[in-house]
């Protein structure tokens, strides 16, 4: 029962073969069996989830249907605020903080009678690629518990992969949905910037952050995005146009499409097994009728550096509000300044402090032009590179991450090698474009490999179309080996 | 050596929009602490700002009234600094792309007009309020600090002048005229005492004739036009003294101490904080099309200089017109209303700029705190025209009205100041005076006018001073001619 896809559960709920209550009980049961090993959740809302499931069943019984998410167990990353449920963004500084309001994405789930299982573990304030930066302990990869699940939306990826949720909500600032999706063998997509409201998403880097779904299939990703996307008057950067049609042509295949392989996103630093799986998938697309062209995007090579100036700069201001004055943990001091300093020094983890310092420095008088100013110029170049590429191709493809899941602790002392995990995913955030990761195989250690499809802004339909084709061509059927034990 | 003061003024104006700059909370003054707050203005995790359209329209109004260029596209920046009453620990403000740039205000002072250039007018948000408890209310000695976030996020417009001002009096005139401009636009209460209008001044001095500017001292905490003028006069004297003794003026911020009448060093600008401005990523650019700009221009009300011109045209002298429109007493609205209700403009202007202003000065109060209304002015000037009140009695009546003793009719009755203009009554008083003074009447009839004044005095005495002297004169002449 825990292995339902969204579309499978959606049908089963409506033909009466399963109830929302049964789905949530199965999800909570799976969480109970796996949490000690995987630690996907920071908070499990047993009571609230069962109440919501019963309410969804009552709606079905009354013949009311709020859409495809009605009665579906959803795991929500802990950087989206939930009214009445502790929300910490995996930071000590917010330990015990219970928000008085729901993020718009959460409100949408509730309006559509989805069932929120709980709040998932993550890298503190979404800063990291392994979920090891959580103040409340690392999460583990369900495929191999000595390995990281990726991050920062590691908990949501695990929940979907391990069967304690059918849909996971993540946020993606530089790859935080796609990279853990790749490492956990699920589908993860980052929508066009502005499609999903950021209201109530605890900001890391405002110009890059975007909420998106983690699911078991591409079609489920489409359905989840349809449920989440839409203009929100509470987010000034929210897209104002009509919601684009994401589903058109989903089954249309790739014949006649031009697909670009990004030359810069392969080679040195990429696992051989990752490269092999990637090439094999590209060949399958070619055989299916896509025209494959190699595309060079020179700015890709500097985008990582630009990202590590822009994101920290924005975060240095975004995280300034955590000062112990109005909420969260507070450490006493003789003066307000001392209180703030002690609160922040104790409340933030090492990686968060590193990025705040980096960002503060990058914005300082005398350094701004050389760092932040220069990074913005690179960002413009990335946007131009993509624009020029999309004049020639319909979509771009690359591996999602250069490696499969690495060992826990192997990169925590080496931030730069950790940062390289996001080299393929960061460019789409800088450009504000949509991108998706689809599992396409496993490496020699049996760890999943992700394949990334990128498209121009609001080009979700073509992105999903290619992703759906890849999914069918590859026929990735593997599941974490431990699932049978947990079942 | 003679020194020339160079002054630039930054004015903060709180807009009186219904809601705050970036959220739907009420923006009004005086609510119970922390009642007008929400996730956005408290900077709860995840909350995002959405700009107030009304505020944007109003800053454009201000910019147009100040002859500024309105940017077709401008952006918000984050100004980063940590302070307990600044919820996000950054202020959403504007930096190098403000809504309005390069304008001017023509300032009248003692019959002379000088043009003060406006560098920029930009949009930002206000902070909360810190209330220091214990230790005399100063932050460093306080036992605790209480925070009220009602004001956090209230729309604030900053108007920055060029250093075109060269005397404290001119600075005061600029500030007053700016206030009346903002008030006339209907975009702010512009009340100094409530802090909805606040100013800081940058002051330096240089040898007269020099082009180069001296080290700039920022003076803060001037809460009235008078304190602005006093603080600047003090600061100019202080700087002159320092320079003449051969020392140099450090660039710094100084605090005006109203009670002591001095400025005191707050912090040195040389080691000042770096605000690390960067473009606000939570907001999109403010776009004002030419069409929209012209739409807003069309809604501009009559501006103070236009109003002064209209008053002068209707017969007021320019000084009175300017005092009514831009004077700090805020008499313009009362004047306008009284005239609209039929009072004679010149008379009302005289009573307001003369007696009323003197009264307010003497009592150190404001017109709002007195009982005087436009209806009172209409009534009083009516009584004067009808001859029921003499000019001297009117002074007493006005004083009584200002004191809250009632309407002019009430005060005049209570103080027994109604002039007798009923010809019949005066005639009988005259006749009875003449009957008791037949000699005097004889003299008049014989062409000897000497007793005339005596007889008028007798009639006035008989009527308790309430007879209209003009009428008494007429009747006496009539009797003499018989």
Image (cartoon, coloured by chain):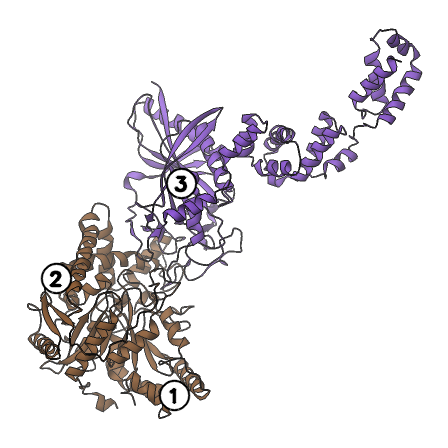
Q: Residue A439: image x %, image y %? A: 17, 79
Figure quadrant of the N terminus of chain A: bottom left
* Labels 3 and 1 share a subunit: no
Q: Tell me where residue B429 sits by quadrant.
A: top right
- Secondary structure of the residue carrying tag 2 is loop
Figure quadrant of the C terminus of chain A: bottom left
Q: Is residue A50 visible?
A: yes
- Above/below status of B214 relative to A407: above
Q: Residue B315: image x %, image y %? A: 59, 27
- Above/below status of B424 relative to A139: above
Question: What residue is shown at x 41% (from left), y 71% (from top)?
Answer: A83
Q: Which residue is mark 3?
A: B159
- Secondary structure of the residue carrying tag 1 is helix
Rendered image: mark on residue A155: none
- Secondary structure of the residue carrying tag 3 is strand
* Labels 1 and 2 share a subunit: yes
Q: Which residue is mark 2?
A: A297
- Above/below status of A483 relative to A337: below
* Relative depth, front residue between A317 and A302: A302
Image colour assigned to chain B: purple
| Relative horizontal placement of residue A373, taking residue B33 as reference (left or right) | left
Q: Which residue is mark 1?
A: A21
Q: Tell me where residue A429 sits by quadrant.
A: bottom left
Image colour assigned to chain A: brown
Q: Is residue A131 visible?
A: no
């Amino acid at each position: 029962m825990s292995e339902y896809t969204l579309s499978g559960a959606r049908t089963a709920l409506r033909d009466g073969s399963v109830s929302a209550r049964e789905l949530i009980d199965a999800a909570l049961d799976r969480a109970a069996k796996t949490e000690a090993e995987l630690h996907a959740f920071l908070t499990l809302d047993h009571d609230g989830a069962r109440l919501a499931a019963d309410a969804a069943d009552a709606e079905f019984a009354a013949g009311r249907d709020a859409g495809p998410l009605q009665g579906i167990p959803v795991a929500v990353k802990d950087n989206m605020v939930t009214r009445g449920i502790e929300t910490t963004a995996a930071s000590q500084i917010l330990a015990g903080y219970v928000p008085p309001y729901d993020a718009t994405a959460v409100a949408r789930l509730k309006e559509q009678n989805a069932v929120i299982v709980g709040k998932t573990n993550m890298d503190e304030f979404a800063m990291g690629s392994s979920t090891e930066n959580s103040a409340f302990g690392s999460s583990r990869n369900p495929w191999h518990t000595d390995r990281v699940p990726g991050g920062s939306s590691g908990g949501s990826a695990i929940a979907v992969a391990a069967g304690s949720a059918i849909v996971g909500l993540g946020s993606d600032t530089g790859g935080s949905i796609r990279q853990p999706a790749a490492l956990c063998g699920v589908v993860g997509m980052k929508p066009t910037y502005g499609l999903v409201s950021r209201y109530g998403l605890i900001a890391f880097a405002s110009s890059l952050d975007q909420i998106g779904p983690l699911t078991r299939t591409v079609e489920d990703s489409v359905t989840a995005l349809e449920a989440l996307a839409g203009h929100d008057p509470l987010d000034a950067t929210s897209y104002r146009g009509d919601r684009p049609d994401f589903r058109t042509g989903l089954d249309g295949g790739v014949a006649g499409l031009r697909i670009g392989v990004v030359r810069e996103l392969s080679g040195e630093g990429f696992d051989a097994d990752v490269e092999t799986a990637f090439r094999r998938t590209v060949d399958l697309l070619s055989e299916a009728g896509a025209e494959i062209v190699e595309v060079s995007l020179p700015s890709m090579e500097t985008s990582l550096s630009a990202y590590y100036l822009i994101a920290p700069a924005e975060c240095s201001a975004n995280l300034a509000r955590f000062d112990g004055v109005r909420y969260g943990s507070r450490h006493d001091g003789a003066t307000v300044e001392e209180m703030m300093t002690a609160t922040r020094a104790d409340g933030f983890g090492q990686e968060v402090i590193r990025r705040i310092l980096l960002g503060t420095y990058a914005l300082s008088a005398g350094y701004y032009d050389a760092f932040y100013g220069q990074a913005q110029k690179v960002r413009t170049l990335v946007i131009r590179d993509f624009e020029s590429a999309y004049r020639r191709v319909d979509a771009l493809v690359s591996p999602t991450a250069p490696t499969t899941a690495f060992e826990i602790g192997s990169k925590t002392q080496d931030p730069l090698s950790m940062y390289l995990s996001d080299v393929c995913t960061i460019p789409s955030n800088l450009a504000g474009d949509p991108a998706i990761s689809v599992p396409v195989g496993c490496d020699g250690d049996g760890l999943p490999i992700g394949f990334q499809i990128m498209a121009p802004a609001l080009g979700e339909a073509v992105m999903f179309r290619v992703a759906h084709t890849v999914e069918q061509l590859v026929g990735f059927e593997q599941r974490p080996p431990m699932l049978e034990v947990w079942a | 050596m003679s020194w020339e003061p160079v002054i630039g003024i930054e004015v903060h104006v709180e807009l009186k929009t219904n809601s705050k700059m970036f959220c739907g909370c009420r923006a009004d003054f005086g609510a119970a602490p922390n009642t007008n707050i929400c996730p956005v203005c408290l900077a709860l995790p995840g909350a995002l700002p959405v700009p107030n359209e009304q505020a944007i329209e109003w800053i454009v109004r201000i910019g147009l009234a100040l002859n500024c260029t309105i940017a077709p596209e401008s952006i918000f920046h984050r100004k980063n600094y940590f302070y307990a009453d600044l919820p996000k620990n950054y202020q959403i403000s504007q930096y190098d792309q403000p809504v309005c740039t390069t304008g001017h205000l023509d300032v009248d002072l003692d019959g002379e007009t000088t043009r003060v250039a406006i560098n920029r007018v930009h949009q930002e948000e206000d902070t909360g309020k810190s209330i220091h408890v214990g230790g005399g209310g100063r932050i460093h000695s306080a036992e605790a600090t209480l925070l009220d976030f009602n004001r956090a996020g209230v729309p604030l417009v900053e108007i920055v002048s060029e250093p075109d001002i060269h005397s404290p009096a001119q600075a005061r005139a600029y500030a007053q005229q700016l206030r009346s401009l903002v008030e006339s636009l209907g975009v702010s209460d512009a009340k100094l005492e409530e802090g909805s209008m606040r100013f800081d001044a940058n002051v330096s001095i240089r040898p007269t004739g020099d082009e180069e500017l001296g080290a700039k001292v920022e003076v803060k905490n001037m809460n009235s036009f008078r304190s602005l003028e006093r603080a600047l006069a003090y600061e100019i004297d202080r700087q002159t003294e320092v320079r003449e003794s051969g020392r140099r003026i450090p660039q710094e911020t100084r605090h005006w101490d109203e009670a002591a009448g001095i400025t005191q060093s707050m912090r040195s600008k040389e080691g000042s904080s770096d605000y690390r401005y960067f473009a606000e990523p939570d907001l999109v650019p403010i776009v004002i099309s030419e069409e929209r700009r012209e739409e807003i221009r069309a809604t501009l009300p009559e501006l103070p200089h236009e109003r002064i011109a209209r008053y002068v045209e209707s017969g007021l002298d320019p000084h009175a017109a300017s005092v009514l429109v831009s004077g700090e007493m805020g008499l313009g609205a009362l004047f306008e209303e009284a005239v609209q209700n039929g009072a004679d403009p010149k008379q009302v202007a005289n009573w307001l700029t003369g007696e009323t202003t003197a009264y307010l000065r003497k009592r150190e109060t404001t017109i709002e705190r007195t009982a005087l209304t436009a209806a009172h002015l209409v009534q009083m000037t009516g009584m004067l025209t009808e001859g029921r009140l003499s000019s001297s009695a009117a002074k007493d009546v006005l004083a009584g009205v200002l004191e809250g003793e009632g309407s002019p009719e009430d005060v005049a009755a209570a103080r027994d100041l109604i002039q007798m203009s009923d010809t019949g009554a005066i005639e009988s008083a005259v006749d009875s005076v003449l009957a008791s003074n037949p000699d005097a009447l004889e003299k008049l009839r014989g062409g000897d006018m000497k007793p005339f004044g005596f007889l008028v005095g007798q009639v006035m005495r008989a009527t308790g001073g309430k007879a209209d002297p003009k009428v008494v004169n007429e009747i006496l002449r009539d009797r003499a001619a018989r």
